[in-house]
Image (cartoon, helix red, strand yellow):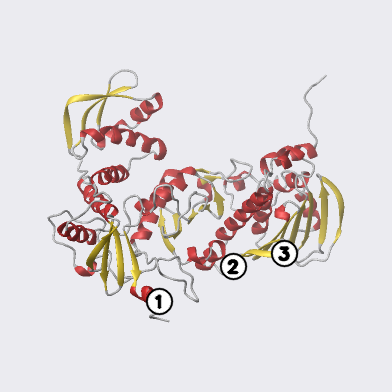
Amino acid sequence: MAKIIKLDDRLSNMIAAGEVVTRPASALKEVLENAIDAQSTKIEVHLKDNGLQEIKVVDNGIGMEKADIHLAFLRHATSKIKNEYDLAHIKSLGFRGEAIPAIASVSKMKIASKTTDSDPYEVIYEGGKLTKEGFAPLNIGTIVTINDLFYNVPARLKYIKSPQAELAHMLEVCDEMMLSNPNIAFLVTHDDKIVRQSHGDSNYQHLFNAVYGNDVATNLVDYHQTKDDIKISAYLIKPVVTRSKKNDIVILVNGRTIKNYLLINSVIEGYHTHLMVGRYPIALIDIKLDASLIDVNVHPQKREIKFSNEYVIAGLIRETIRKAFESKPQSIPDVLKKEDKYMKVSGFELLFSEIEEAPSYPAPDNQVPLEKSKRKLPDMDYIGAYAGTYLLFQNQDGLFLIDQHAAAERIRYERIFIRLGDVSQTTQPLLTPIQMQFKPSETETIQTNLPLIKSYGLILEPFGDYTYLLREKPAWIEDKDIDYMVYGFIDQLQDYQQIDVALLRDQLAKDISCKGAIKANKALSMDEINHLFKDLQACDNPYYCPHGRPVIISFSLYEIEKMFKRIV
């Protein structure tokens, strides 16, 4: 007697629900994607009891007829694709036809819908079984209601430890949908209280205000770049506002929110030295490319996709972000700046917005100083020191504090970066070859990319199993930093399939500049202070140290006088 049996549809849907509907937020995501695919311009999300009692999504899309509503509850029934060509060129958010039957199998689910040519109709399923259907009063569009999610799967309910955490995940899904669809007006309520709202006016300033608040929205910078039919639109928050986690880095590919380690890291790398160690930016990266260059059919939740040119896109993201910050003037943080009656600010504003941009990196010591008009910092007079670390300066605009260690670190970093920058491929033979041992995976990477590594001045010669002799090195690298360079090349090749010497120079310059910089609590002479300030004025970025900490902050005269009630 055969031991293998075909599972019935209801049990198959419950198994599928284990992959598609892992928590209330994933059910909400699937329903919202269907609403967006239905060409909606307005979407409402109503949650009750942290979404565990009810999730309701109302849209004004094209709607469904009676027959289509019934078909929507069948597994792998979809209107999004019809053949293999459609599967290879997916432009909709949904396409698998699994979400509705999966959700219906573990909840009490109702779908009511109306098209321009049909009467409104509703269908109710409980635990995957049809319990009721009939006509219902409804405008054009669709209402999907999910009640008592996981009521028949006690094991899944047991893992929901915090209803508040589930609500936070659902709001995160709503935020992603709002950010990825600026042309759709969203309204999100929880227990009849509005918690999110966007106006669908395609204004990203308004959109970031709706999702993150004015503190964040007022620091928005956007930059757009197209290369090889790949369009990158970067909406970046200046690093005066950062997060402790990477959750607020949103990557969109053809309107779909995805999770991709390489692309998220490329955003962080694009911010370069603007970020402190352990802090992450708020950023929205919108990528548009040919649908045939990606494969979204790799995961039931459609959060992961495969690229045919992932490393090209990662490099383009880094380049776009760096150009975005180069194109916008930075500012000295004004720590006393208060909120304006009409515009809430983050505590930082541009004091010298008309200052011209300086070159990418400052010139060596023997070059003529920068013209006054091109300096990033204004002239100011030294008046004292505080706590042996912070140098006090003043001018007609107010009071300035400079962290002497951070300032010295920034100056040294930019000079060292230039000195390390002479990658003219000049090599230096080693009197005694250096024997280097590698892991098998590293050896394979080296062997595959040996000509590329050689082009950068590293001459490696095989010397037994997993061992190489280094016979020549680039002239700009010191002997003590050879290991860092070699293993840095290997890491880059494994992660990005290419070599970026600038990244290695950057990290090396950071390490060297920190070790030799003026320390905190070290008394400086007047000549040392004057020299330090002039050198800081000549820096390309005098506002942050290489690790992202502020170098200089300001107390504007206007705000100081307001504090002392000289200005009412």
Query: What amino acid is found at the position of numbered circle 1 in the picture?
Result: Lys
In the picture, the quarter occupied by the N terminus is top right
Does residue 511 appear left or right of residue 62 in this picture? left
In the picture, the quarter occupied by the C terminus is bottom left
Q: Earlier in the sequence, mark 2 or mark 1?
A: 2
Does residue 552 appear left or right of residue 143 in this picture? left
Q: Residue drawn 40% across and 76% down? A: 562
x, y percentage for residue 564? 39, 76
**Can see residue 16?**
yes
Residue matched to label 2 = 200
**Quick check: 186 above or below 562?**
above
x, y percentage for residue 299? 60, 41
* Dots 3, 2 in contact, CB < 8 A: no
Residue matched to label 3 = 192
Residue matched to label 1 = 562
For the residue pair 309 and 464, the one nearer the viewer reads as 464
Picture disc at residue 462: none
Mark 1 surroundings within 10 Å by alpha-carbon count, few (fewer than 14), some (14 through 19), many (20 or more)? few
| Label 3 secondary element | loop
x, y percentage for residue 508? 28, 42
Mark 2 surroundings within 10 Å by alpha-carbon count, few (fewer than 14), some (14 through 19), many (20 or more)? some
Q: CA distance from mark 3 to mark 2?
A: 21 Å
Q: CA distance from mark 3 to mark 1?
A: 42 Å
Q: Earlier in the sequence, mark 3 or mark 1?
A: 3
Q: Residue drawn 33% across and 60% down? A: 326
Query: What amino acid is found at the position of numbered circle 3 in the picture?
Result: Asp
**Can see residue 81?**
no
